[in-house]
């Protein structure tokens, strides 16, 4: 049996049906991400697991026990909220030490753990400061340290990095993942940032309007979106109609729409040799945008515009108005 199991969870706020028949399982020691746009019910599901909201119906199990009606502090769950709530009258050290003091850990051990954790989140020099003296991102890191230092059975992280600048955020993603794996803390992470979900997760559950649209590993979700919504939310998929795509590439992809990642469209100034399993077409470069490591070209294929990514070495091989040839491996094209 899975370590955490949500069974047919429904949650209504008045007439607003926020969670609809959610079935979700989390294996012990995994980091699982709930990914989805604003308002789709991610925080509500976490709050139900923590016991801060009651489910309207359904069951929640943790480590073989039903916890649907157990009071929050008996669930053994640590949480970092979207609105991180530090104790304003305690300094950084005491905020982080709080949970360890409750556990009656010896003082020397508490100090050692607090210092170690503050080192990890990069706040060793702020140990005596009060929350009001810290920036939003620094407060968020204190909240993270406070939750992780107690090594809870389950850690719930609700957009814990949203107030942190890009570079530090990337480092913290890797650090959180490292600590989580090292301590084997079963973690549910909430984000609406697909890149963050890809970097951190064992499994991703993509939410849409209170339902799980698709579940899978980062690679599965990225390469095989199951629906148009998934393909819109993940990656940078081109989503032409199947009719248009089939006309231009002389293909027979089934479905309403076709999902094609920009990086699988190979551009060349030479017409590619016709081979089985390769779809080809001729087009004209319309424009390009530099992303640093790659250049995204927009190419017009007889009225059908598609984006194609080319790894940037040190010069642009194609310019606006050039005729180019595209080749796509057919088995990477997804009919939806
Ligand atoms: N306490 C509450 N009372 C009434 N409605 C609520 C309450 N909490 C959440 N909702 C509603 O439930 C829906 C889902 O909210 P939730 O906070 O779970 O979304 P979310 O996916 O976490 O979004 P975000 O990415 O913006 O944080 C929203 O329509 C919201 O208005
Ligand atoms: Mg939320």
Image (cartoon, rainbow, N blue to C red):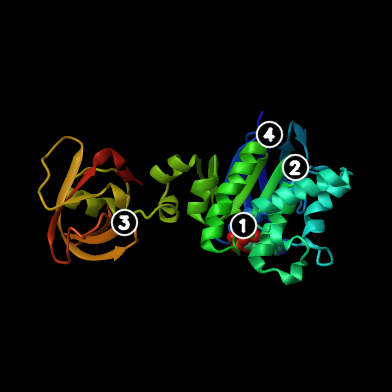
Q: Earlier in the sequence, mark 3 or mark 1?
A: 1
**Which residue bears the numbered disc 3?**
294
Q: Mark 4 highlights which residue?
A: 3
Within 10 Å of disc 1 (Cα), the crowding (few <14, some 14-19, many 20+) is many
Disc 4 crowd, CA 10 A, few/some/many (<14, 14-19, 20+): some
User: Disc 1 marks which residue?
Assistant: 159
Q: Using residue 196 as the reference point, say whether residue 286 is left or right of it.
A: left
Depth order, front residue of 122/102: 122
Q: Nearer the viewer, residue 264 or 289?
A: 289
**Discs 1, 4 touching: Cβ within 8 Å:** no
State the residue at coordinates (52%, 59%). 167
Residue topped by disc 2? 152
Q: CA distance from mark 3 to mark 1?
A: 28 Å
SS at circle 1: loop
Question: Mark 3 and mark 4: span between their CA atoms?
Answer: 41 Å
Crowd rating for badge 3 (residues with CA inside 10 Å; few <14, some 14–19, many 20+) = some
Label whose residue precedes the other's in the sequence (3 or 2): 2
Q: Is mark 1 within 8 Å of ligand 2?
A: yes
């Amino acid at each position: 049996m899975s370590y955490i199991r949500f069974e047919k969870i429904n949650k209504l706020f008045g007439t607003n049906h926020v969670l609809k028949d959610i079935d979700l399982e989390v294996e012990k020691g995994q980091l699982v991400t709930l990914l989805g746009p604003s308002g789709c019910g991610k925080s509500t599901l976490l709050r139900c697991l923590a016991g801060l909201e009651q489910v309207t119906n359904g069951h929640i199990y943790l480590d073989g026990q039903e916890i649907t009606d157990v009071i929050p502090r008996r669930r053994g769950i640590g949480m970092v909220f979207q609105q991180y709530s530090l104790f304003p009258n305690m300094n950084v050290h005491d905020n982080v030490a709080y949970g360890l003091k409750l556990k009656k850990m010896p003082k020397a051990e508490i100090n050692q753990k607090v210092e170690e954790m503050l080192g990890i989140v990069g706040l060793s020099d702020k140990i005596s400061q009060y929350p009001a003296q810290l920036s939003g991102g620094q407060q968020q890191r204190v909240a993270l340290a406070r939750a992780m230092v107690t090594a809870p059975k389950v850690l719930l992280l609700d957009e814990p990095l949203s107030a942190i600048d890009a570079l530090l955020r990337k480092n913290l993603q890797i650090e959180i993942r490292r600590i989580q794996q090292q301590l084997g803390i079963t973690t549910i992470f909430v984000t609406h940032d697909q890149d963050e979900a890809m970097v951190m997760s064992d499994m991703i559950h993509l939410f849409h309007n209170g339902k799980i649209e698709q579940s899978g590993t980062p690679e599965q979700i990225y390469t095989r979106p199951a629906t148009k919504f998934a393909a819109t939310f993940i990656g940078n998929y081109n989503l032409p109609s199947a009719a248009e795509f089939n006309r231009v590439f002389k293909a027979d992809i089934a479905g309403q729409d076709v999902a094609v990642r920009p990086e699988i469209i190979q551009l060349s100034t030479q017409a590619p040799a016709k081979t089985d399993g390769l779809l080809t077409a001729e087009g004209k470069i319309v424009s390009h945008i530099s992303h640093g490591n790659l250049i995204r070209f927009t190419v017009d294929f007889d009225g059908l515009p598609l984006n194609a990514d080319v790894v940037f070495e040190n010069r642009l091989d194609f310019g606006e108005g050039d005729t180019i040839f595209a080749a796509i491996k057919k088995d990477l094209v997804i009919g939806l």
